Amino acid sequence: MKKIDLDTALRLIDGAKKKALEIKVPMDIAVVDAGNNLVAFQRMDGAWLGSINIAMNKAYTARAFDMETKTLAPFCQPGQPLFGIHASNDGRLIIFPGGIPLKDGNSVIGAIGVSGGSVEQDQVVAEAGVAAL
Amino acid sequence: MKKIDLDTALRLIDGAKKKALEIKVPMDIAVVDAGNNLVAFQRMDGAWLGSINIAMNKAYTARAFDMETKTLAPFCQPGQPLFGIHASNDGRLIIFPGGIPLKDGNSVIGAIGVSGGSVEQDQVVAEAGVAAL
Amino acid sequence: MKKIDLDTALRLIDGAKKKALEIKVPMDIAVVDAGNNLVAFQRMDGAWLGSINIAMNKAYTARAFDMETKTLAPFCQPGQPLFGIHASNDGRLIIFPGGIPLKDGNSVIGAIGVSGGSVEQDQVVAEAGVAAL
Amino acid sequence: MKKIDLDTALRLIDGAKKKALEIKVPMDIAVVDAGNNLVAFQRMDGAWLGSINIAMNKAYTARAFDMETKTLAPFCQPGQPLFGIHASNDGRLIIFPGGIPLKDGNSVIGAIGVSGGSVEQDQVVAEAGVAAL
């Protein structure tokens, strides 16, 4: 099974950065491994300071539940089954787009998290990172 | 590029206080620099104790995303794209009016945060602080 | 009984800053009131970022126990009666010099905390703040 | 004045990694900018998970006090002037070798933090990172 080693993480971040440059939105980008521990993080010049935490936690969340953070969003709204979950895990869960699990076949081997633009922009940059896997 | 040094921060706070006195609402007022580190804070006599934290975190939030905290508000409501973001950044994000980034041309060089009244009052006092820049 | 209102806090900070300028060590300076809530904080240009937290918490500690933080130091060493106390109060206690309670007669009405140099320098600047009371 | 932008941070991390490979100890390496905000982080394959936090916080500490974390160590021991400081700054201060401020002339423009081996190994790898500046 593939592992998210440092070289792989950096390749994913480079893929994400290329897309971020293309859409002209500087991003914070984080990659975690199968153990949900940070492998690499980069803040592009001019990217939001508040997105350092969010990029890391999008990656954390995607591996925490083995699903895209955008998938969580509808279930976490008021009145929905998981409302309130964002305050669990010591406040580390992010319940909007930009975090995507990394898979080898059906196995989740890590995750990428991107923050710095609109959630649509974050998502497309995260997808570009995954495509580099 | 201008820097938010202590003299500048105190001038902004004085501008904000003048407006707070004018509208007769005592305020907590905080100023951070470009690195999002606190430069100065003042609690006017009679201002809410709970606003000490909120004023500081409004300034933090405005610099964290280089936008007014009031701009964040609609995007962070239930059902909206950033719902749940207020639990990120270790609970330091404030997603209602009263935090404004400080700019030199297009560069964000710091932020001011005001809390102590209605959000409309907080906003107008924060704007008076910015006007003193 | 005197109260540590904002004007008083700012006068104390000015007294402390004058001494800091005299000894040529930029300082972070905080003043709390009788309720141990922050009234004012200033970071002099060039003062340590890590001292923002410490200055505030020296003031907090001095009011928390109504004694100078330097008085606490010997009791908090390994093998001494209060060893370990620095981890209490959510990590807000500082057990070395630079925090001094403010008194009106025998009543503690607040505290000042100074950080940015050696503990001797912090202490002398805090004392200059108290002298301005 | 030089800035610790992303390219610079990655160059420093590469310099540190080269030394880590040479001494055959995988390391966690972090770089912060002048505002003490994380710019980049990398965990080398096999590096300790517990060092993710420590590498980041060594960089944080070195910028927080504009000095090497090894300089802090003797002053923070039991019976010494700063004993207990490690519990301040929300538990983010690391008071042993491996964190070094980055300077442009006399100005501190950021810091590097390294963790993963003995403190001597951490220090030599951090120094190799600084040498790449």
Image (tube, coloured by chain):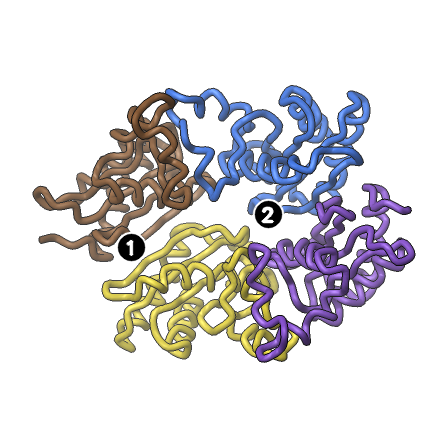
Chain colours: A purple, B yellow, C brown, D blue
Residue A44 position (above or below residue B85): above
| Distance Cα–Cα, label 2 vs label 1 | 27 Å
The image quarter in which residue D107 lies: top right
Q: Quadrant of residue D50?
A: top right
* In the foreground, B86 or D62: B86
Q: Residue at x 70, y 42 (%)?
A: D41
Q: Residue A113 appears at what percent x and percent y? A: 73, 58
Assign a secondary structure to mark 2: loop
Q: Residues within 10 Å of mark 1 (few under 14, many from 20)?
A: many
The label shown at residue C96 is none
Image location of residue D34, percent across then percent down: 58, 44
Q: Residue at x 69, y 29 (%)?
A: D116
Q: Chain of mark 1?
A: C
Task: Tell me the quarter of the picture where residue D55 sits.
Answer: top right
Q: Establish whether labels 2 and 1 are both on one chain.
A: no
Q: Which residue is mark 2?
A: D37
Residue at image x 53%, y 70%?
Answer: B68
Amino acid under disc 2: Asn
Kind of residue indicated by mark 1: Val
Which residue is under mark 1?
C39
Q: From where the camera sits, is residue D57 visible?
A: yes
Q: In the displayed image of the protein, which residue is found farthest to the front?
A: A81
The residue at 51%/59% (across/down) is B91
* Residue C124 in the figure: left or right of residue D45: left
Count all numbered tags in the image, as a single digit. Answer: 2
Residue B102 in percent (x, y) is at 51, 63
Q: Is residue B38 left or right of residue A55?
A: left
Please tell me which residue lies in front, D109 or C109. C109
Circles 2 and 1: CB distance less than 8 Å? no
- Please tell me whether mark 1 sits on a helix, a strand or a loop: strand
Q: Is residue C17 visible?
A: no
Chain of the residue displaying label 2: D
